Amino acid sequence: MNNLKNISKKAILNNYFYCKNFNKKIMVMVKANAYGHGLKNIVKILKNKVSFWGVANLLEALKLKFLLKRKSNILVVGKSTNFKNLIKNNIQITIDSLQDLKTIKKISSKLKTTAKVHIAINTGMNRIGVKNIKEFKQMINFITKNKTIKLKGIFTHCFDADVKSSHFYKQMKKFKKYVNLLKNKNILIHIGGSFCLTKTIPNFVNMVRIGLFLYGYGLPQLKRAMTITSRVIKKIRANKGEFVGYGNTKLNKNTTIGLVPMGYADGVPLKLSNIAKVTINNQKCKIIGRVCMDMLMVDITHKNIKPFDKVIVFNDANYFSKITKTSVYETLTNFSKIRAKDNIIY
């Protein structure tokens, strides 16, 4: 295997237990193939430690359930309409309307089973969530009267907890108005994402959903968990004035090119072309020419590098994101494309 996704068990555990130190329950978010790190990898490391898992849709939930191979609390945090399959598979469901509940009641009654739901509250992000108290009261009343629906939690999402001038506390004030209406507060009352841990979390909140922090980004105390490696598969000697790759990149010197079988189809951003550097034998080597779909070329002139030497293509999403002017989240999830069988946990 030339291309490998290397996941550090030590880093994942370090990051998980760092988040646990805040004395709140933790829901581990593993959507988008565990932020590009490989769902299978993260489950293998954490399955005996994590009680609550979060995903974005039914397909992710079913994959996670299969990997866990035991009864677990899995919540589809995103908006879903495939209620029947979620209920049949004992997957917990996010709802944000009375109509959701009416639909779920019909399905759960027909299946003669109980649907487990979490009510999303819109405290300002305007993505998903109930936005008015009146409908929330109607929903709570509806659940109370129907034995085939069980309320497992309510939650909101904090949209700017990572900045100093955050609306976090204003959101918590809005959220508390809904929490105060609950007669039964012995449920999960949770918020996300990871940067909420950097704030003073109100006592009424008993769980935080973490994503980015688990994978090693956002705080200096965290350890980056993923390194992407490949191999030099060929050395090519080209003369000054010749071209390399697509797009008329002309060489300004006699150059030895190292060919690496990884490209933008594998998650390497096209914008790294002619800018970013990879590491081979502890030597920085610049990408030359345009990153191709499944290959990239690097300048290895006057370097002691030979075919089959290991190439560290990626080990810091901040570096890639600065060049591409995009978010760390996007950089990480792009690497979802590397196949699960090409993963190593060390």
Image (cartoon, helix red, strand yellow):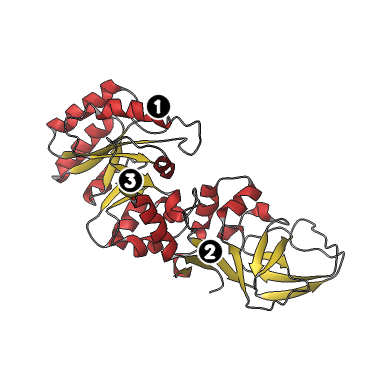
Point 30% across, 56% down: residue: 50
Q: Which residue is mark 3?
A: 76
Point 33% across, 57% down: residue: 64
Residue 97 spot, x, y in % from top left: 29, 30
Bin the neighbour count of mark 3 within 10 Å (Cα to Cα): few under 14, some 14-19, many 20 and up. many
| Residue 227 image label | 2
Q: Which residue is mark 1?
A: 170
Q: Is residue 59 left or right of residue 278?
A: left
User: For numbered disc 3, what is the local secondary structure?
Assistant: strand
Point 41% across, 35% down: residue: 158
* Amino acid type assigned to the residue bearing label 3 in the image: Val
Asked if residue 98 can be seen in this view, the reply is no
**Residue positioned most to the top:** 134
* Amino acid type assigned to the residue bearing label 1 in the image: Lys
User: For numbered disc 2, what is the local secondary structure?
Assistant: strand
* Amino acid type assigned to the residue bearing label 2 in the image: Thr
Q: Is residue 338 shown above or below 323?
A: below
The answer to which quarter of the image holds residue 197 is top left
Residue 45 spot, x, y in % from top left: 36, 64
Q: Is residue 322 left or right of residue 135?
A: right
Point 22% across, 32% down: residue: 102
